[in-house]
Image: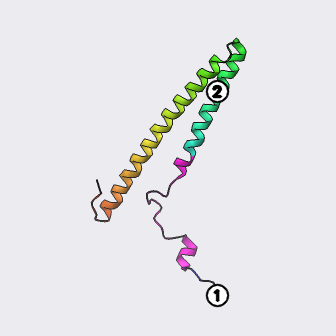
Amino acid sequence: MPRRGNPAEAMNGPAEDPHTPGTDYGSYLTLGLQLAITVVVFFFLGRWLDGKFGTDPWLMLAGLALGITGGLTAFLMKVSALGKEEDRETAEMKKESGREPEK
């Protein structure tokens, strides 16, 4: 016989805390895509400029280097900011529950 759930849970969803650290991965999931798009866009921009100015392959390589550098810089800054935010939320949750945050 199938198990029946809590009627309140069926109406309101699961009783989990929506602000539990580590449950919001949406910000992390887009980072790889943003990095890849940045590199590809700058690569093709350099390739297009090479066709315009006849400088094969130098502007394509410069665009690739610029895309990698800019993309990685933005990626690392965002990861660092997200990590600090998650650490802050974890410390707040531990403080609210009466436990001291681990150092």
For residue 48: magenta? no
Residue position marked by numbered label 1 in the rendering: 1
Q: Position of residue 63 (x, y in %)?
A: 60, 23
The type of residue carrying mark 2 is Phe
Q: Residue at x 28, y 63 (%)?
A: 99
The colour scheme used here is rainbow
Quarter of the picture holding the N terminus: bottom right
For residue 12: magenta? yes
Picture quarter containing residue 56? top right
The type of residue carrying mark 1 is Met
30 left or right of 84? right
99 left or right of 48? left
Compared to residue 55, the image places residue 31 above or below, namely below
6 left or right of 92? right
Q: Position of residue 55 (x, y in %)?
A: 67, 13
Mark 1 vs 2, N-terminal side: 1
Q: Residue at x 46, y 56 (%)?
A: 22
